Image (tube, helix red, strand yellow):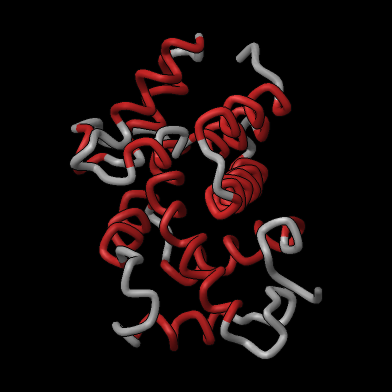
Amino acid sequence: MNFTREESIEFFKEHNKDDMYMRHALAVEAAMKHFARLYGEDEDLWGRVGLLHDIDWETTQSVEAGHPVKGGEMLRERGYDEDFIRAVLAHGWEFSGVEPKNRMEKTLYAIDELTGFVTAVALVRPSRSLSDLEVKSVKKKWKDKAFAKGVNREVIERGAVLMEEPLEFLIKNTIEGLLPVEREIGLGAA
């Protein structure tokens, strides 16, 4: 991979002006790096894939408009390698037709939605922080189908099965992965 993090951030910002999308990209990047450390994988690669997985989102806004396939095309045009592109396509497996096969692809598939859910849970807590967020609190909100309705829990559960990890393990490690970027993603004390 020949692109620095800074170059990747600039590329992302060329196509995504809304801060909300940048916060999500930073959250997924941080979680992916955390999981890469856990599994003894390349943190920079996993982080960069997490950072750019939704490169096309502000442009497409939906799978009907081509997400994540359009993102794969954008990355290919910029010169990202095919393994990188495959991981981005696999996070939208149901729409791209690219099934997650390796550990990086499976992890991205599982935690993309989960980072949003964990963030949503933290936002409704008095502290608005991850530092006091426990797995049981996330699981309690998980059962409330009216909470964070936009998060596809089935994708997260399918991802946990693909990863051969319990959901609680994914939640715990997603919280831990997001802690270092808590402020950057709009959480914690103001």
Expressed as whole percent of the image width and height from the top left, the position of residue 173 reads: 59, 62
Considering only vertical position in the picture, is 40 above or below 174? above
Nearer the observer, 32 or 52: 52
Expressed as whole percent of the image width and height from the top left, the position of residue 65 reads: 23, 37
Residue at horizontal 46%, vertical 54%? 111
Expressed as whole percent of the image width and height from the top left, the position of residue 166 reads: 42, 66
Residue at horizontal 53%, vertical 78%? 121
Considering only vertical position in the picture, is 11 above or below 172? above
Residue 100: image quadrant is top left
Tally the numbered discs: 0
Residue at the far front in the pictured view:
17
Residue at horizontal 46%, vertical 69%? 117
Compared across the picture, whether 34 is left or right of 76 comes to right
Could you tell me which quadrant the C terminus lies in? bottom right
Expressed as whole percent of the image width and height from the top left, the position of residue 10 reads: 65, 27
Considering only vertical position in the picture, is 23 above or below 80? below
The answer to whether any part of residue 35 appears in the image is no
The answer to whether any part of residue 171 appears in the image is yes
Residue at the far right in the pictured view:
190
Residue at horizontal 32%, vertical 26%? 70
Nearer the observer, 149 or 112: 149
Could you tell me which quadrant the N terminus lies in? top right
Nearer the observer, 156 or 169: 156
Compared across the picture, whether 106 is left or right of 66 comes to right
